[in-house]
Image (spheres, helix red, strand yellow):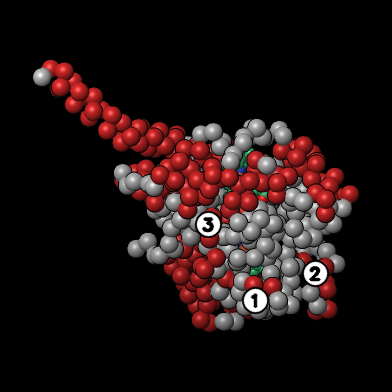
Amino acid sequence: MKSATRFFVALALICAAPAMAETMREAVLRKAALENGLRPVEESWPEFEPEKAEVGKLLFESELLSLTRNVSCRNCHLDEFGSADGLPLGHGAGGVGKGIERMKSPAGVLSRNALALWGRGGAGFDTFFWDGRVDASSGDVRSQFGNMAPSDDPLVVTVHLPPVEFREMIGESDATEWLRLGEVGAAARVHMEIARRIRETPEIAAPLAVASGLEVAELTYLQIAEAIAAFIRSEFRLRKTKFHRFVFEGETLTERELAGGLLFYGRGQCAVCHTGAYFSDLQFHAIPFAQFGFGFNGFGIDYGRYNFTLDPRDRYAFRTPPLYNVTKTAPYSHSGVEPNLAGAIRAHVDPLAEIDTSRLSALDRAEVYQKIARWSQEPSYAVELSDAEIAELVAFLAALEFDPEPVR
Ligand code: HEC
Ligand code: HEC
C-alpha cells in the first residue's frame, strides 16, 4: 500500500513535470519583460489636447503641407502598412497610389525606409528619425535648427522637418529651385507659405485657431506642428498587445511565442538594444544590413548617426527601431533592404548570409567589411541563432502586434 502510494505520487509528479516546467518558463519570461522595462501601455500615454489632435488629423491628411501640393503625411504613414508605407524607400512628392503602385509613379524617392509612428512622442520617447537628428535625450532639443529650435517639444520640432525635405514633400521643379540653392531661411520660407495656405483654408484654420487660442491671422507653422504632434500622440498611442496580456493579465502564449520570448530576452540578447517600454533603447548601434538605393550619403552609402555627430564611432549606427507592429512594416532596416523578418533578424547574427558579396563592387565590399568591423564592437556580436530559433523569434514578434482601433 505504502509503496503504491509512493508510486502514484511519483507518477503524478512525472505527469505534472511538463506543466510545471512550462510555468517556470512563463515566470522567467514575465520577470525578464518587467526587468527590461515593459509597462502597461497606459503608462506610456502622453498628454495631448484633444481639440488640437482633431484638427491635426486634417493637417496630417492635407496636401497643402507639400510645397508642390502633391503629397500629405498620410501618403507615407498608412494604416494598412502599420503606419509606414510598405516600400523599401519612402516615395514622396509627385507619387500616386500606395504600396507597389506608388513605386511605378513619378514620385521623389527618399534615401530611407519610412518609420512607423506607434508610441512616438509617448512618455520618454524623445529621439527621432533613424539617425536621431532630433534628439532631446539630454534635456535640450538638439536638431538642425541649432539654438533656433521652434519648440522645446522634440515631436513638434520633428514635425517641422518633412515639409522642408526635397522629394519627401517638395517636388523638384524650376519653381522650387530657389530652395535648393541653400538660401538662408529657405525652410522658414516654406513654413511661412504653408501657414499662409492654412490661414486661407477656413475649414482647417477656424478649428486650429480655436484649439490654439489665437486669431486665424496669428497662426504660424508652429500651431500647425503642435496640432499634428497632438494627433500623432492620440492616434498612434500604444495599445495592449498579446504580450502585454501575457505579462500583466496571465494570458498564455503559444509554445513558439514563449520560446521566442525567452530567446529575445535571453541568449539572443535582443533586449540589450530592443528594451524598455518601446522595445528600443533609443540609442544608436551598427547592425551590418546591406544598403539599398542611393543612400543618405550617396553612392550607396549611409553613415547614419555619424552624419550628425561626426564622431567616427557613430559611423553606420542607427537608432534601434521600436518593434510594435513590426510584423506589418516590411520591408526592414534603414534602407528597407530586408523583405522579411527572418532575414532582418539573421542580418544581426550572420550578416554575410544576407549579402551576396560576389556581386558587390569593390567600394561596396569595402563598406560591408567596415560595417562588420563596427558591428564587432556591439555586445550581441557573438550570438548564434539557428533557422528554427529565428522562426521562434518571429513568432514572438507577432505577439507585439495590436490593432489601431480607437482607445475610447
Ligand atoms: C515621402 C514619404 C513621407 C512623407 C510624405 C512623410 N513621411 Fe514621415 N517619415 C518618412 C520616412 C522615410 C521617415 C524616416 C526618415 C529618416 O529617419 O531619415 C519618416 C519619419 C517620420 C517620423 C519619425 C519617426 C521616428 O520613429 O522617429 C515622424 C514623426 C514622421 N515621419 C511624421 C511625418 C509627418 C507629420 C509628415 C507630414 C508633415 C510626414 N511624416 C510625411 C516618410 C514620409
Ligand atoms: C546591438 C543592438 C541590437 C541588438 C542586440 C539587436 N538589435 Fe535589432 N536592430 C538594431 C538596430 C540598430 C536596427 C536597425 C539597423 C539598421 O537599419 O541599419 C535593428 C533592426 C531590427 C529589426 C528591423 C526593424 C525595422 O523596423 O526595420 C528587427 C525586426 C530587429 N532588429 C529584431 C531584433 C531581434 C529579434 C534581435 C535579437 C536576435 C535583435 N534585433 C538584436 C539593434 C539591435
Q: Which one is nearer the viewer's eye here, 241 or 49? A: 241
Q: Is residue 202 left or right of residue 338?
A: left
Note whether ligand 1 is within 8 Å of mark 1: no
- The residue to which callout 3 is attached is 327
- Report the disc number at residue 127: none
Task: Residue 402 in the image: state x and y as whole percent.
Answer: 43, 58
Mark 3: which secondary structure? helix
Mark 3: amino acid: Thr
Mark 2: which secondary structure? helix
The C terminus - image quarter: bottom left
Say if 325 sits above or below 377 in the image: below
Marks 3/2 in contact by CB < 8 Å: the verdict is no
- The residue to which callout 2 is attached is 179
Image point 41% across, 52% down: which residue?
Answer: 241
Q: Between tags 2 and 1, which lies in front?
A: 1
Q: Quadrant of residue 192?
A: bottom right
Asked whether residue 173 is in view, the answer is yes
Q: Is residue 312 left or right of residue 264?
A: right
- The residue to which callout 1 is attached is 101
Q: Between tags 3 and 2, which lies in front?
A: 3
The N terminus - image quarter: top left
Mark 2: amino acid: Leu
Looking at the image, tell me whether mark 1 or mark 3 is earlier in sequence order.
Answer: 1
Note whether ligand 1 is within 8 Å of mark 2: no
Image point 40% across, 44% down: which residue?
Answer: 255
Q: Quadrant of residue 296?
A: bottom right
Task: Residue 220 in the image: state x and y as whole percent.
Answer: 61, 69
Looking at the image, tell me whether mark 2 or mark 1 is earlier in sequence order.
Answer: 1
Mark 1: which secondary structure? helix
Q: Residue furthest right?
A: 362
Mark 1: amino acid: Glu
